[in-house]
Image (cartoon, grey):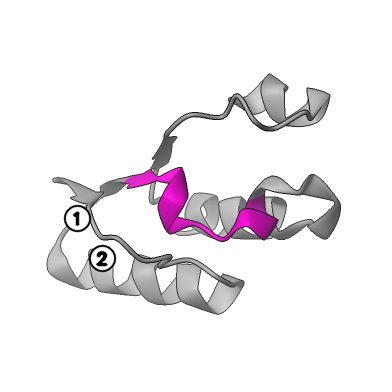
Amino acid sequence: MIVEEVVEEVVINSIDDALELIGNLYYEGYAKIIISKNNITADFFNLKTKLAGEILQKFAQYQMPLVIVGDFEKYNSNSLRLYL
């Protein structure tokens, strides 16, 4: 099953938030998640913080495919464009 997280607030501010989300989704029987970029801290998209790599590694480690949707035009990162 796939879940789409539809909430107004940021739900992933840290690695711990990501792990909690993964655990909750797994417990509820979901195998994949779609989430808006607005539900992830802006630090995630600043690749210098390394937060994106650490969070994405957790999703990969726990075999929980993650799709991030949204408008990414405002980000001026060549590295980020390779992944989005």
- Residue 19, image x, y percentages: 47, 72
Relative to 21, is 29 above or below?
above
Q: Which quarter shows the C terminus?
A: top right
Res 30 label: 1
Q: Nearer the viewer, residue 2 or 40?
A: 40
Query: Residue 28: horizontal and vertical position, in percent?
Result: 14, 68
The image position of residue 65, as x and y in percent, is 39, 43
Task: Please tell me whether mark 2 sits on a helix, a strand or a loop.
Answer: helix
Give the extent of the magenta segment: 35-44
Image vertical order of residue 41 relative to residue 35, above or below: below
Residue at 30% across, 47% down: 33
Label pair 1/2, CB-CB below 8 angstroms: yes
Residue 36: in magenta span: yes
Taking the spot 20% from the left edge, 72% from the top edge, the residue there is 27
Circle 2 residue: 26
Left or right of residue 76, residue 61 in this image = left
Is 61 above or below relative to 1?
below
Q: Is residue 11 magenta?
A: no
Q: Position of residue 25 (x, y in %)?
A: 25, 64
Q: Residue at x 13, y 45 (%)?
A: 1
Amino acid on which the number 1 mark rests in the picture: Tyr
- Among all residues in the image, which is located at the extreme front? 74
Picture quarter containing residue 83?
A: top right
